[in-house]
Structures are given as structure tokens and as C-alpha cells.
Image (cartoon, rainbow, N blue to C red):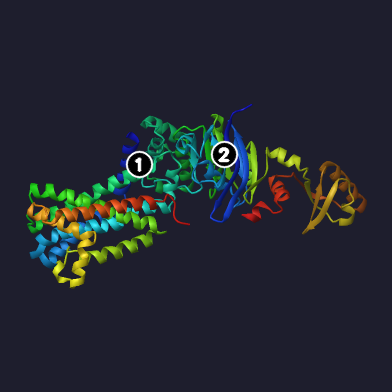
């Protein structure tokens, strides 16, 4: 069995009278990319803050690398590389100075060569003497990642690492995260992007209103709920007839587009073609959308992820 | 120790690269001397120690905590809290840099007084004056620490600090002699934190001697400083108030 790097037991956290997490249990194994997926305010950042030792839980325990965050916060923090949601670095320092300082805070002292080698991985060598506050958003995000691993941690916690980035910068950050994973590091990231969770994470915990409502691989989450696929086509057919086709659980029109929910799209599509032929209609623009994490989220929480954000 | 030195170097660079810090900490004290010199050049012997103390007072109450408050508001302190750095190292490093800045400011004022206005200073007077200036700086910075810990925003801290500063500046014998004040106020002022510093610095700098009441002044100053440091440490926050 693989080693547990993060162990959260019965964690309840509150800000005053507001309960942010309620009885959360979670384990993350060595070498995983683990995603916390949920809307803003779901409790993702609070969960990370408790793992990082930045917030004192009301109840429960957190261990990182086998060390209790509550009883030995300093030792637990040494296990971690951190990127907070807000890129808050000492931005009157240059890129190279920042990496040197943040490594030193962990009593890791990097040589100039080591700093450059680290910056090269994040495509920041040319910016080594630039003040951090003069970097672009994408560069600052990459710098925050470089700083997060300056102490060579085995566990890296990333709070919305690609928020507010353009698609190009976002994919560059994804590549970096994959590299960190390839090096054997355990990565936990929060996101409210399904695309990001599906692209990066081996396992995902769906978090809503301070509770983990499901936790599994993305494919298992979708498979376990036996969610339907969505067949879309441009065709005019009576809805009552479409609804009687095999495997169809629901059908509706959105403008001119017919949307059919089906458990077995191949069977339904054949039947739809037959129905269209009998009715003297032609089918155009057929599209199939497989169930995704958005559907899982909707099914589990009763509201859409995008709506909640 | 190496960690502390690297952090202190970073703090120093951050202060030196900040235009606000450079102007208010290094240009403004000299400007103050020019202003007082232009208005009352014949009293600059009396004024110079006063300017040293009023500058230390504004620095301690307001300027010295500006960068710490900014770091707190921008979540930089929270990011530092996520590292194993003990809070004492962060505060110690920040204080050290600010004490050096405070001492440099006083040096600039003394140099301006001596070179431009012929204020008589000697090695003996400087040797005696600097410990007094340092004690004053520490007490004022600790009082500034209480203000920054107690309020939510840097703007509010600055407003409170400036109010206290202006209140003490006019009554603590820095610019206007004590006997110009109403009788009841003359009885109160000696127990306020800026007055003992003014007396200690003035007699040290101008006469190279200790003030006749130096023991009571010093005890009062240490009481203020130590008490304020304890309260400031209690109020220290890594994050802004919600």
C-alpha cells in the first residue's frame, strides 16, 4: 500500500460562528495529484489552510508526512511547498532574491547556480534580476510555483494555481504541475475548473458547503453515478416520440437543437435515424457529449458548479 | 542565524527599494532641519535634539510599521506564516532594519545640525546621546506596534499614529519649552513617553551629560517601552482583521 502523505481526520473548522468545514476526512497517497473541486466558498481554501497550519481547527486532526500539524506545526510545514490563492510574495525583491529568501526560510540555502537551475524550469532565468512586482500575471504565477518548491518539498499544495490566467499561461502552469508530479512529488490543488481537475488530477474530492460529497478518480466518479450521455442533433421530430426511443431518459429542444439524454448513445442514435427516416426528416449536426464532472457535481449537490461560482 | 541574516538582507533591500520609505525616512528628516533652520536658526542648539525626538516619534509611531502593515494587508505575512519561520525571527529582523534606519535618521539630523547650524557636538556627547536615542526609538516603535496590532487597516493605523504624534510633538518640550504650557499640562507632560526622551537626548547631545532626573526619565521610558512591547507582541497578527 502506498504511503499516506496527507491524512485529514474528522476536521471541523470555523470562522467565528460560520462553519467552513464539517467533519472532513481525507487521505492523499504519495505521488498523487489530488484535486479539491468545488465552487467559491465551498471550503477548499480552508481545508488547505488547516493542512498548512494557517488555521486552527475546531475539531479533528491533520497529519502531513506522518507529522501532526497541530502538535508540531514547524516540522509539518517543512514537509510542504505552498502556493496561496493570492500570489503574495515579497515583491520588492528580484526573482532570484525571492527564491533564495523563501528557500532560506526553510533553512535550505541555495547557491546561485541552484537558483538559476530552478528558475530555468519555470522559464524565468531571464527575469532573475527583475523585481517580482514587474512580472506579468503568468510569470508571477510561475514564480509562486518556483518559490513553492524552493525548499524541495515532497508535498506541494497549490490553491487555485491557474486562476485569472489566460489559456496559454494556464497550460504552461499545467505542464509545470505535471513535471512536479513526474518527480514523485505529491500534489494537492484546489480548483473550480472541471477542465483543470480532469486534465491534471488522478483523484478528486468534490467539496460543497464544507463537506466532501464524493472522492474518487474522475472516471469512477462519473461511472459510479451511472450518468447519461447527451446526444445533440438538428432535426424536427415530435418530442413524445423521441422520448419512447430505447435508452432515452429525457428529451427537450433548445432552439432548433434536439437534446436527448441516453444511457447508451449508440443504440439511441440508431433508433433516432430510423425515426427520422420514417418521418421523412434528415438529421444534421449530430454531437455526443459524454458525462463529465460538471454532471457529477450537479447530481451530487443539486446545483451546477458554474452557477455556484 | 544564516536564515535570520538572509531575511534581514531581504528586509533591508525592500526598504531601500521603496520610494515612500526613502523619502519619509531619509529626505524628510533633513528637510525638517532646513525648515526649522529657516524659521529659527538662532535656536538650533535647542531645536536639534527636539527634531531628533520628534522624528523618532513619528518614525516609531507611524513610518516604522508601514511596511509591516502593507505586508499584512497584501497577505505576504500569511505566506510567511506558511513557512517554518518563527514569528520572532520575522519581527526581530524587521525591527533590526528599522532600528538601523531610525539611528541613520538621527545621524542625518545631527550631521545637518552640526554642519549647517554649528550645533556643538563632540565624541563624548554622541556616545551618550545614541543610547538615549535608541531607547526612545524602541519605546516609540513598541507604541507603534500596539497601534498596528489594534487596528484593521494601515490607513487607520497611520491616522491614529499621526494624532498621537502631533499631540505629543507640541507638548513634550521638543519645539516649545515646557513652561509655555498651561500649569496643569506641565504636571502631566513629564509622565508622557516623549518628554523623558527629549530631556535625555538634549542633555546628552548638548552638554555631554546625563539629565539631573535621568534615572526617573529612564525608568519611565523603560516602563513604557517594555509594557508596550508586551502588548504589541500580544496584538501581533499575521493576517488583517476580518
Question: Which is more toward the observer, B237 or A110?
Answer: B237
x and y, in percent, of residue A287 in the image: 76, 47
Looking at the image, which is closer to me, A266 or A67?
A67
Label disc, if present, on residue B139 of the rendered structure: none
Q: Chain of mark 2?
A: A
Residue to which mark 2 is pinned: A188
Q: How many marks?
A: 2
Q: Residue lying at the far bottom in this picture: please name it.
A: B182
| Element type where label 2 sits in the image | strand
Compared to A77, does B185 lie above or below? below
Q: Quadrant of residue B183?
A: bottom left
Residue B133 spot, x, y in % from top left: 19, 52
* Residue A200 visible from this viewpoint: no
Q: Residue at x 29, y 57 (%)?
A: B61
Q: Which residue is mark 1?
A: B89
Q: Is residue A103 left or right of residue A188?
A: left
In terms of image quadrants, where is residue B62?
A: bottom left
Quadrant holding the C terminus of chain A: bottom right
Amino acid at each position: 500500500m502506498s504511503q499516506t502523505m496527507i491524512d485529514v481526520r474528522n476536521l471541523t473548522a470555523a470562522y467565528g460562528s460560520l462553519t467552513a468545514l464539517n467533519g472532513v476526512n481525507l487521505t492523499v497517497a504519495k505521488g498523487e495529484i489530488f484535486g479539491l473541486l468545488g465552487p467559491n466558498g465551498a471550503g477548499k481554501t480552508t481545508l488547505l489552510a488547516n493542512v498548512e497550519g494557517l488555521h486552527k481547527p475546531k475539531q479533528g486532526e491533520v497529519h502531513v508526512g506522518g507529522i501532526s500539524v497541530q502538535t508540531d506545526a514547524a516540522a509539518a510545514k517543512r514537509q510542504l511547498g505552498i502556493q496561496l490563492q493570492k500570489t503574495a510574495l515579497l515583491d520588492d525583491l528580484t526573482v532570484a532574491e525571492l527564491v533564495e529568501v523563501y528557500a532560506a526560510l526553510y533553512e535550505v540555502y541555495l547557491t546561485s547556480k541552484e537558483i538559476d537551475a530552478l528558475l530555468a524550469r519555470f522559464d524565468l532565468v531571464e527575469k532573475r534580476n527583475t523585481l517580482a512586482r514587474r512580472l506579468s500575471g503568468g510569470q508571477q504565477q510561475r514564480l509562486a510555483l518556483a518559490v513553492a518548491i524552493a525548499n524541495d518539498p515532497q508535498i506541494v499544495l497549490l490553491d487555485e494555481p491557474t486562476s485569472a490566467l489566460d489559456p496559454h499561461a494556464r497550460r504552461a502552469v499545467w505542464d509545470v504541475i505535471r513535471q512536479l508530479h513526474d518527480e514523485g512529488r505529491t500534489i494537492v490543488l484546489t480548483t473550480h475548473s472541471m477542465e483543470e481537475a480532469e486534465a491534471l488530477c488522478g483523484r478528486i474530492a468534490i467539496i460543497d458547503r464544507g463537506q466532501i460529497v464524493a472522492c474518487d478518480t474522475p472516471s469512477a466518479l462519473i461511472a459510479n453515478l451511472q450518468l447519461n450521455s447527451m446526444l445533440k442533433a438538428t432535426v424536427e421530430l415530435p418530442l413524445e416520440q423521441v422520448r419512447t426511443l430505447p435508452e432515452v431518459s429525457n428529451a427537450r429542444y433548445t432552439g432548433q437543437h434536439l437534446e436527448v439524454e441516453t444511457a447508451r448513445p449508440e443504440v439511441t442514435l440508431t433508433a433516432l435515424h430510423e425515426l427520422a427516416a420514417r418521418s421523412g426528416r434528415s438529421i444534421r449536426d449530430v454531437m455526443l457529449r459524454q458525462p463529465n464532472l460538471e454532471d457529477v457535481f450537479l447530481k451530487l449537490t443539486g446545483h451546477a458548479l458554474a452557477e455556484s461560482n | 542565524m544564516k536564515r535570520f541574516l538572509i531575511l534581514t538582507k531581504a528586509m533591508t533591500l525592500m526598504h531601500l527599494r521603496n520610494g515612500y520609505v526613502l523619502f519619509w525616512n531619509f529626505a524628510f528628516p533633513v528637510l525638517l532641519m532646513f525648515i526649522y533652520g529657516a524659521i529659527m536658526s538662532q535656536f538650533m542648539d535647542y531645536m536639534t535634539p527636539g527634531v531628533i525626538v520628534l522624528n523618532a516619534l513619528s518614525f516609531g509611531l507611524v513610518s516604522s510599521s508601514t511596511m509591516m502593515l502593507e505586508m499584512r494587508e497584501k497577505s505576504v505575512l500569511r505566506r510567511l506564516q506558511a513557512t517554518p519561520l518563527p514569528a520572532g525571527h520575522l519581527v526581530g529582523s524587521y525591527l533590526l532594519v528599522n532600528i538601523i534606519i531610525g539611528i541613520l535618521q538621527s545621524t542625518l539630523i545631527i550631521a545637518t545640525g552640526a554642519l549647517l547650524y554649528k550645533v556643538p557636538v563632540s565624541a563624548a556627547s554622541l556616545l551618550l546621546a545614541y543610547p538615549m536615542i535608541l531607547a526612545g526609538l524602541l519605546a516609540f516603535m513598541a507604541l507603534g506596534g500596539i497601534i498596528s496590532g489594534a487596528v484593521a487597516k494601515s490607513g487607520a493605523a497611520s491616522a491614529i499614529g499621526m494624532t498621537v504624534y502631533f499631540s505629543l510633538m507640541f507638548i513634550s518640550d521638543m519645539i516649545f519649552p515646557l513652561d509655555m504650557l498651561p500649569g496643569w499640562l506641565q504636571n502631566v507632560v513629564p509622565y508622557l513617553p516623549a518628554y523623558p526622551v527629549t530631556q535625555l537626548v538634549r542633555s546628552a547631545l548638548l552638554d555631554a551629560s546625563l539629565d539631573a532626573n535621568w534615572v526617573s526619565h529612564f525608568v519611565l521610558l523603560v516602563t513604557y517601552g517594555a509594557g508596550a512591547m508586551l502588548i504589541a507582541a500580544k496584538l501581533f497578527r499575521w493576517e488583517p482583521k476580518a
